[in-house]
Image: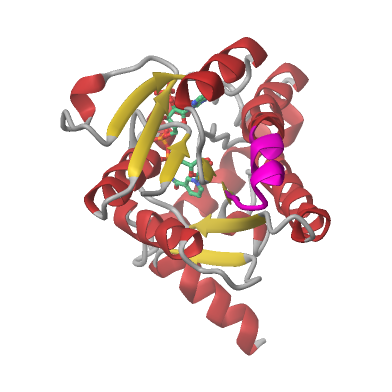
Amino acid sequence: MKTVLITGCSSGYGLETARHFHARGWNVVATMRTPRTELLPPAERLRVLALDVTRPESIARAIEAAGPIDVLVNNAGLGLFGAFEATPMATVRDIFETNTFGTMAMTQAVLPQFRERRAGLVVNVTSSATLAPMPLVAAYTASKTAVEGFTASLAHELAAFNVRVKLVEPGYAPTTRFTENGTERMQGLLPEAYAGYAQTIFATLGQQSAFTRESDVAEAVWLAANDASVRLHYAAGADALALVRQLEAA
Ligand SMILES: NC(=O)c1ccc[n+]([C@@H]2O[C@H](COP(=O)([O-])OP(=O)(O)OC[C@H]3O[C@@H](n4cnc5c(N)ncnc54)[C@H](OP(=O)(O)O)[C@@H]3O)[C@@H](O)[C@H]2O)c1
């Protein structure tokens, strides 16, 4: 029986991915900054562990407690919407600390066991924002685009060890806690000079009819985890898939 370790399982895509893998018979290590066991049904094949991807000692503890794993899903992430000019560099660094360096640190923590076993897969959850640039998410897009380049390069050096890395690129889900989790961080990031422009962007976003559901991401991660091919990219959600079709047609 295979084991998956997923980061950021307290809500949204991560929580649904944990449920999805568990329902399909895998051992699941669902990790959260603050463990809330009530979010998932009590089950033998499901463990909830504490893990903050920005803290080396937390990573070491979780990897030790998890035991051997077959698939790592780097899903934990922070959102950021606002004018780049108004975004403090400390906030930019916080975003990178979780989205980019957290993903790298987790990957580094599992690679020794994957390499020794000549087996293993890392799935990095980025964003459809990396496929086509969107306004007012420059720092966030940078943090996720870095993961795309990191993953594409890593795929080459790990292939000789039969260790694979893949990217899941979700679109926008209004139903996760993504926006709510970022509200405080985004205060003051749309100064007066950008207000008119931001209004036009909000109006465009308000007309969007295709979205991503949590289940779309869980299914894409599942597909990636069970796909032995060298395919790197898995867009997830109706909006992300429409974007891919648009780019392919261009
Ligand atoms: N929702 C969207 O529109 C969207 C679109 C494209 C890509 N994504 C990406 O999809 C992933 C999941 O997002 P979501 O929409 O499901 O958002 P979410 O509901 O806010 O979930 C994000 C998860 O990441 C966790 N997290 C944040 N910082 C962490 C840290 N330092 N260590 C460990 N866990 C941490 C959060 O835990 P806490 O409860 O502890 O904060 C939460 O469980 C993210 O990587 C996000 O960038 C989201």
**Side of 145 where 72 appears, left or right:** left
- Residue at (34, 17) in percent of width and height: 35
Which residues make up the magenta segment? 110-122
Residue shown at the point (65%, 64%) measured from the top left: 132
Q: Position of residue 160 (x, y in %)?
A: 79, 60
Q: Residue at x 51, y 46 (%)?
A: 70
* Colour scheme employed for the rendering of this structure: secondary structure
x then y, percent, for residue 39: 22, 28
Q: Residue furthest top?
A: 57
The answer to whether residue 75 is left or right of residue 111 is left
Q: Camera-side residue: 173 or 228?
A: 228
Nearer-the-camera pick, 185 or 191: 185
Secondary structure mostly taken by the magenta-highlighted segment of the chain: helix
Residue 3 percent across, percent down from the top left: 42, 43
* Percent x, y of residue 177: 36, 34
Q: How many marks?
A: 0
Q: Quadrant of residue 90?
A: top right
Can residue 176 be seen here? Answer: no
- As drawn, 240 above or below 244: above
Q: Is residue 127 above or below residue 84?
A: below
User: 190 or 41, which lies in front?
Assistant: 41
* Lateral position of residue 220 relative to residue 113, left or right: left
State the residue lying farthest toward the front: 117
Q: Is residue 230 above or below residue 3?
A: below
Q: Give the vertical position of 110 relative to 91 (above or below).
A: below
Considering depth in this image, is 195 or 212 the residue closer to the camera?
Answer: 212
User: Which quadrant does the C terminus fall into?
Assistant: bottom right
Residue under the image location 40 percent in, 55 percent down: 217
Membership of 121 in magenta stretch? yes
Residue 182, visible in the rendered structure: yes
Is 75 within the magenta?
no
